[in-house]
Amino acid sequence: MEAEVITHEYGVYEAKTKLPAILKQVEQGERVTITNRGEPVADLVPAASRATQQTEKAVAAIKAMRTGRIDQRQFSAMRLRGRRG
């Protein structure tokens, strides 16, 4: 089962004017495609080290849930926060 990846698409001009906000989206694990006249020219994806950190946190949360230290509601909240950063 693959994790859901949120993808956004921006034209070159819009990407240039919204770069800080776009980088925050990427930091939160989202994928961004930059287009030029509707044609994809670049993909911004989270750095591998950040993805590794997020994976390690998720694994730790799953292990904690299995040992009974957190309940499903807490896990769902953690998962949602992980998607937002």
Image: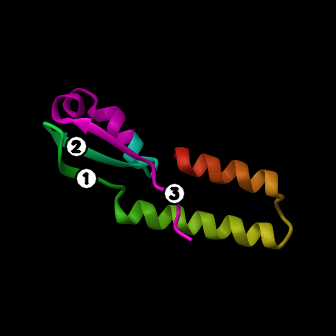
Residue that badge 3 annotates: 4
Residue at x 81% of width, y 57% of height: 72
Q: What span is in magenta?
A: 1-24
Residue that badge 2 annotates: 34
Mark closer to the chain start, 1 or 3: 3
Residue 53 location (% of width, % of height): 49, 64
Is disc 1 placed on a helix, strand or loop?
strand
Q: Looking at the rendered structure, which numbered label has been put on residue 59? A: none
Identified by mark 3, the residue type is Glu
Q: Is residue 23 above or below residue 13?
A: below
Q: Looking at the rendered structure, which numbered label has been put on residue 43? A: 1
Along the viewing direction, whichever of 1 and 26 lies nearer the viewer:
1
For disc 1, the neighbor class at 10 Å (few under 14, some 14 to 19, many from 20) is few
Identified by mark 2, the residue type is Ile
Q: Are marks 1 and 2 in contact (CB under 8 Å)?
A: yes
Residue 67 location (% of width, % of height): 83, 73
